[in-house]
Image: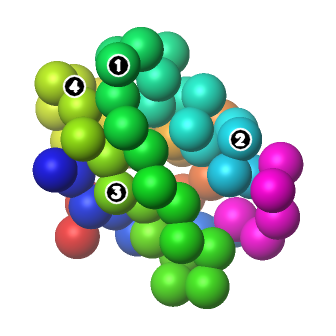
Amino acid sequence: MLRLKVEGMGCGHCVGAVTRAVQALDPAAEVRVDLQAGTVEAQTRADAAAVSRAITAAGYSAQAV
């Protein structure tokens, strides 16, 4: 399970964008976004660096916790 701190999320659109970014790397990924905490948890086969890059490419700042 990956846990990332993601800055710039604030709405349902953000949740969808982040989820799609992770699932583009691993379509079977389970993604949980906590807007209040600014975190994303992902059960995925992709590595943390790739997930962080994908979320960053989607327009958010992401860093593994």
Nearest to the eye among marks 2 and 1: give it: 1
Q: Is residue 21 visible?
A: yes
Tell me, yes or no, whether the two marked residues, 4 and 1, touch with CB atoms within 8 Å.
no
Identify the residue at horizontal 35%, vertical 19% (top origin): 28
Query: Mark 4 belongs to which amino acid?
Result: Ala
Q: Where does the magenta region start and end?
A: 9-13
In what element is the residue under mark 2?
A: helix
Query: Mark 1 belongs to which amino acid?
Result: Ala
Of label 2 and label 1, which has the lower sequence position? 2
In what element is the residue under mark 1?
A: loop
Of label 3 and label 4, which has the lower sequence position? 3
Of label 4 and label 1, which has the lower sequence position? 1
Q: Is residue 54 visible?
A: no
Tell me, yes or no, whether the two marked residues, 3 and 1, touch with CB atoms within 8 Å.
no
Mark 4 closeness class: few <14, some 14–19, many ≥20 residues within 10 Å: some
Of label 4 and label 2, which has the lower sequence position? 2
- List the residue tagged with mark 2: 16
Mark 1 closeness class: few <14, some 14–19, many ≥20 residues within 10 Å: few
Query: Mark 3 belongs to which amino acid?
Result: Glu
Q: CA distance from mark 2 to mark 1?
A: 15 Å
Say the numbered circle drawn on residue 49: none
Quarter of the figure that contains the C terminus: bottom left
Q: Is residue 39 left or right of residue 49?
A: right
Classify residue 17 by image quadrant: top right
Q: CA distance from mark 2 to mark 3?
A: 14 Å
Say the numbered circle drawn on residue 28: 1
In what element is the residue under mark 4?
A: loop
- List the residue tagged with mark 3: 41
Identify whether 41 is placed above or below 48. Answer: below
- List the residue tagged with mark 4: 46
Q: CA distance from mark 4 to mark 2?
A: 18 Å
Query: Mark 2 belongs to which amino acid?
Result: Gly
